[in-house]
Image (cartoon, helix red, strand yellow):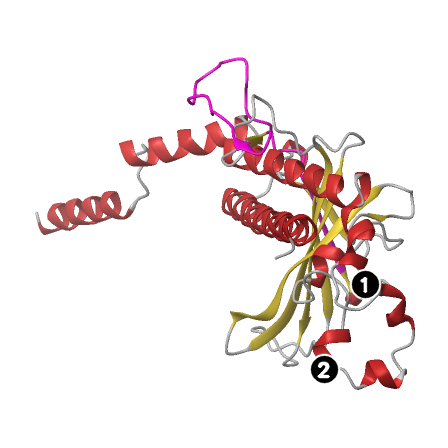
């Protein structure tokens, strides 16, 4: 009898400790959600709208800097001294002036970036792009064992007509500044670079941008609507690259096109090299954050240009 009871207890304990063979309703919903996101390539209409907004800002900036050449034509009229007086700052008459009177003959010397005529650069293949610094700092992912200094940049390629984007490259560099890792390995000053490359930053569907203007007046916006024919752009083809000096790769210049080859290259979602769902989700989240920062930066840059143009027009036409 005791043997029977003991056997029953062992069987019951085994049943309790065994892994469940069926999923709970919550687990089923989570699994279906993951499958749904992967099936649609982690498409996100928020990212699509950001691509459209970034392209729109680039188009507006191009009008100021390249097409109308506003700053190139008007900057010499925005100073109290003639423009040719600045060709020789060693002149005593100029040197005796207050420093801020001859530091720059631009309309707004506190925002010099808005007056650069080389905002649009060319890569080694002759394609136009812009470079944006998205921040530097210290990463504490492995605190207290290791600290990493990092730097993030974005290279944005507009299409030939500047109405859409043709490519987005996010570049993340980091250096181990402490000389050790959580595994105890000595990796002093090991440099790494990661890149996220979107070769198809599309924005399908009709644009809806807050703040659009027509003839300098606010544009009437249509209400949001759902159209089944406008599906979100798949992000499954976003490429991921890793570069590391551990594999003796050369230095990596801050340029969109480099000669170095990545030691690891994969895609956000590839059936042949499937990434863990948590990694996929974090990558697409970080990409979206970078697009938000890029969008805000370009909107601010364009706003500065617009305000400077208004102040210059006021000075030239009204005299105050």
* Lateral position of residue 248 relative to residue 194, left or right: right
Depth check: give the residue in front, 304 or 106. Answer: 106
What secondary structure predominates along the stretch shown in magenta? Answer: loop
Q: Does any portion of residue 256 appear in the rendered image?
A: no
State whether residue 250 is above or below residue 285: below
Q: Where is residue 171 in the image (x, y as percent from the top left)?
A: 70, 55
Q: Which residue is drawn at 43% across and 23% down?
A: 224
Quadrant of res 66: top right
From the image, tell me which residue sits under label 1.
247
Furthest residue to the front? 319
Q: Is residue 155 magenta?
A: no
Callout count? 2
Is 203 above or below relative to 84? above
Which region is colored magenta?
215-243
Q: Which mark is residue 9?
A: none
| Residue drawn at point x = 15 percent, y = 51 percent | 6
Crowd rating for badge 1 (residues with CA inside 10 Å; few <14, some 14–19, many 20+):
few
Q: Mark 2: few, some, or many residues within 10 Å (few <14, many ≥20)?
A: few
Q: What residue would you read off at disc 2?
A: 98
Mark 1 or 2, closer to the camera: 2
Could you say which is closer to the camera, residue 68 or residue 302? 68
Which residue is more in the foreground, 58 or 63? 63
Task: Please tell me which residue is depicted at 90% across the width and 83% down the height of the picture.
Answer: 90
Which is more toward the observer, 184 or 102? 102
Identify the element where label 2 is drawn: loop
**Residue 232 belongs to magenta span:** yes
Q: Earlier in the sequence, mark 1 or mark 2?
A: 2
Mark 1–mark 2 Cα distance, whole angstroms, equals: 55 Å
**Residue 48 picture location, percent across and down:** 57, 32
Residue 298, horizontal then vertical, whole percent: 63, 48
Q: In which quarter of the image is residue 247?
A: bottom right
């Amino acid at each position: 009898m005791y043997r029977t009871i003991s056997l029953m207890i062992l069987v019951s304990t085994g049943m309790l400790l065994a892994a469940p063979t069926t999923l709970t309703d919550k687990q089923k919903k989570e699994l279906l959600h993951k499958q749904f996101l992967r099936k649609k390539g982690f498409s996100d209409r928020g990212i699509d709208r950001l691509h459209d907004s970034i392209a729109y800002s680039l188009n507006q900036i191009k009008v100021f800097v390249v097409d109308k050449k506003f700053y190139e034509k008007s900057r010499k009229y925005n100073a109290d001294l003639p423009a040719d007086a600045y060709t020789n700052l060693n002149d005593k008459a100029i040197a005796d002036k207050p420093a801020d009177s001859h530091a720059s003959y631009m309309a707004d010397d506190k925002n010099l970036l808005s007056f650069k005529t080389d905002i649009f650069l060319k890569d080694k293949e002759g394609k136009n792009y812009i470079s944006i610094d998205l921040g530097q700092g210290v990463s504490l992912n492995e605190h207290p064992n290791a600290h990493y200094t990092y730097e993030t940049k974005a290279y944005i390629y507009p299409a030939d007509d500047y109405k859409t984007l043709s490519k987005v490259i996010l570049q993340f560099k980091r250096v181990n500044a402490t000389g050790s890792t959580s595994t105890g390995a000595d990796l002093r000053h090991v440099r790494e670079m990661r890149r996220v490359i979107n070769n198809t930053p599309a924005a399908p569907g009709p644009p809806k941008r807050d703040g659009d203007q027509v003839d300098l007046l606010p544009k009437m916006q249509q209400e949001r609507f759902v159209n089944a024919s406008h599906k979100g752009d798949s992000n499954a083809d976003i490429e991921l690259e890793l570069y590391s000096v551990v594999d003796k790769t050369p230095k990596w210049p801050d340029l969109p096109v480099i000669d170095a080859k990545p030691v690891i290259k994969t895609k956000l979602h590839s059936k042949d090299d499937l990434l863990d769902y948590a990694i996929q989700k974090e990558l697409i989240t970080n990409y979206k954050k970078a697009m938000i920062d890029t969008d805000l930066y370009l909107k601010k840059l364009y706003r500065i240009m617009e305000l400077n143009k208004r102040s210059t027009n006021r000075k030239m036409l009204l005299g105050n």
